[in-house]
Image (spheres, grey):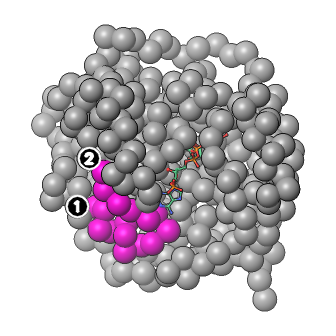
C-alpha cells in the first residue's frame, strides 16, 4: 500500500495565487549587484541551464567573463552556442546529465573531476514539476531525485572528489536554488523518506514544497559540516528567486496551459530579473567568507526553522546517505574529515 504523506497541502491554483502576491511584496534589499564584480579567471558550473532561470544565469556568468560549464539534459549544443553568441565569451562548455538517473549524476562528477575542476562557483538550479509521480531508473520517485537527492549526491560528490578550488585565492561558493514553498510543509515525514509515492497533479505542488524543504535543510546542514570552524572554507548560499516566467509548469494539463502562460507572462518576473539573487551570490565581494545566507528575491530572510534545525539536518543527512548506500555502496570519506 502507498504510504500517506503528512506534509501539508497546497494545490497548483493556490500556489499560482501565492506567486502573484509574492510579486507585489516590497522588501528591503540585501545588497547591490555591481558591474565591477567580474568573474574573469573563475569557473562557474550551472545546472539546469537549458532554459528559464538557469539559462539566464549562464548568460550573466559568461557576460561577466567566467568560464561557464552548463550541465544540462537538453539544449546541447545550441544553448551553449547561444550563450557564446550573445555574450561574446567563447569559454562555455556543455555536459549532458539527467538528474533523475543516479549513474548519470556519478558520470557528471567524474567528467568535472577529469576535465573542468577546480570549480569556483557551483549553481545547483535544475528542478521539475511532474504531472504525476514517476519512477527513476533506480526506482526512486523522480521529483524526489531531481529536486533533492541528486543535488545531495552531486554537491557532496564534487566536494569529496576535490572539485572545488582550494588554493586560498578565494572561498568557493555553492549556490542552491530553492523556493519559499519550503515553508509550507508542517513537518518532515521521516518514516516515508525516499519511499516511492503515488500521486497525481493535485499533489505535485505539495511534494514540490516538501522537496524544497529537504533541499533547504540540506543547504543549512552542508554549511554546518563544511564550516565547523569560524572561517568558511566553502560558502553555501540558498535562495528563492520568486515567481519566474519560465517553463517550470510545462507538464500541467493542456486545459490549464493558456491561463498559466498568461498569468506567468503578466505577473511573474523574467528569468533575467529573477536571476538577480543568484548573480548577487555568485559575484558580490560583500559576502566573501560568509558561511551561509538565504535570499528571497533580493531580500535576506531566515530559512524556515524546521530547515535550520540541526537535528533535522543530521537526520536528513543520515537518511540520504542510507539511500545512496543501497544504490552504490559506502562513500569513500566523510565530508567533515
Ligand atoms: N518558476 C518559478 O516560479 C520558480 C519559483 C521558485 C523557485 N524556482 C526554482 O528555480 C529553478 C529553475 O526553474 P525555472 O523556473 O527556470 O524552470 P525551467 O525553465 O523549467 O528550468 C528547469 C531546468 O531544470 C532542468 N531539469 C529538469 N529535470 C532535469 C533532469 N532530470 N536532469 C537535468 N536537468 C533537468 C530543465 O532541463 P530540460 O530543459 O531538459 O527540461 C531546465 O533546464 C528551479 O530550482 C525551481 O524550483 C522557480
Q: Position of residue 101 (x, y in %)?
A: 45, 72
The residue shown at (37%, 70%) is 104
Badge nearest the viewer, 2 or 1: 2
Relative horizontal placement of residue 123, taking residue 271 as reference (left or right): left
Viewer-closest of 331 and 26: 26
Relative horizontal placement of residue 273, taking residue 129 as reference (left or right): left
Ligand 1 within 8 Å of disc 1? The answer is no
| Quarter where residue 80 is shown | top left
Q: Please tell me whether residue 242 belongs to the stretch shown in magenta.
A: no
Q: Position of residue 261 (x, y in %)?
A: 75, 41
Q: Quadrant of the N terminus?
A: bottom right
Viewer-closest of 31 and 73: 73
The residue shown at (76%, 28%) is 267
According to the picture, the residue beneath numbered tag 1 turns out to be 111
Part of the protein shown in magenta: 94-109
Ligand 1 within 8 Å of disc 2? The answer is no
**As drawn, 60 above or below 179:** above
Q: Please tell me whether residue 98 belongs to the stretch shown in magenta.
A: yes
Per the rendering, the mark at residue 93 is: 2
Is residue 223 among the parts visible in the rendering? no
Relative horizontal placement of residue 9, taking residue 311 as reference (left or right): right
**As drawn, 164 above or below 105:** above
Label 1 element class: helix
Label 2 element class: strand
The residue shown at (38%, 20%) is 284
Is residue 139 among the parts visible in the rendering? yes
Q: Earlier in the sequence, mark 2 or mark 1?
A: 2
Relative horizontal placement of residue 15, taking residue 332 as reference (left or right): right
Viewer-closest of 26 and 254: 254
| Quarter where residue 294 is shown | top right
Q: Position of residue 29 (x, y in %)?
A: 58, 14
Amino acid at each position: 500500500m502507498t504510504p500517506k504523506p503528512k506534509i501539508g497541502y497546497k494545490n497548483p491554483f493556490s500556489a499560482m495565487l501565492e506567486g502573484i502576491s509574492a510579486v507585489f511584496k516590497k522588501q528591503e534589499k540585501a545588497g547591490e549587484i555591481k558591474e565591477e564584480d567580474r568573474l574573469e579567471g573563475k569557473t562557474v558550473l550551472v545546472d539546469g541551464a537549458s532554459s528559464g532561470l538557469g539559462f539566464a544565469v549562464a548568460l550573466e556568468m559568461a557576460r561577466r567573463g567566467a568560464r561557464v560549464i552548463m550541465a544540462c539534459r537538453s539544449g546541447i549544443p545550441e544553448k551553449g552556442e547561444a550563450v557564446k553568441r550573445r555574450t561574446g565569451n567563447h569559454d562555455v562548455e556543455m555536459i549532458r546529465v539527467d538528474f533523475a538517473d543516479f549513474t548519470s549524476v556519478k558520470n557528471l562528477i567524474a567528467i568535472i573531476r577529469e576535465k573542468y575542476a577546480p570549480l569556483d562557483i557551483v549553481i545547483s538550479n535544475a528542478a521539475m514539476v511532474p504531472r504525476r509521480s514517476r519512477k527513476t531508473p533506480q526506482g526512486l520517485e523522480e521529483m524526489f531525485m531531481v529536486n533533492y537527492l541528486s543535488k545531495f549526491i552531486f554537491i557532496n560528490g564534487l566536494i569529496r572528489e576535490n572539485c572545488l578550488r582550494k588554493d586560498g585565492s578565494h572561498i568557493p561558493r555553492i549556490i542552491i536554488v530553492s523556493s519559499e514553498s519550503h515553508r509550507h510543509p508542517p513537518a518532515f515525514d521521516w518514516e516515508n523518506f525516499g519511499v516511492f509515492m503515488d500521486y497525481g497533479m493535485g499533489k505535485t505542488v505539495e511534494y514540490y514544497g516538501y522537496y524544497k524543504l529537504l533541499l533547504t535543510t540540506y543547504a543549512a546542514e552542508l554549511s554546518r559540516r563544511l564550516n565547523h570552524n569560524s572561517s568558511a572554507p566553502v560558502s553555501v548560499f540558498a535562495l528563492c528567486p520568486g515567481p519566474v516566467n519560465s517553463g517550470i509548469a510545462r507538464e500541467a494539463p493542456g486545459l490549464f496551459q493558456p491561463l498559466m502562460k498568461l498569468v506567468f507572462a503578466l505577473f511573474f518576473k523574467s528569468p533575467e530579473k529573477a536571476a538577480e539573487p543568484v548573480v548577487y551570490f555568485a559575484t558580490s565581494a560583500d559576502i566573501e567568507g560568509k558561511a551561509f545566507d538565504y535570499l528571497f528575491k533580493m531580500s535576506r530572510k531566515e530559512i524556515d526553522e524546521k530547515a535550520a534545525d540541526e537535528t533535522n539536518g543530521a537526520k536528513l543527512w543520515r537518511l540520504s546517505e542510507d539511500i545512496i548506500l543501497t544504490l552504490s555502496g559506502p562513500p569513500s570519506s566523510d565530508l567533515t574529515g
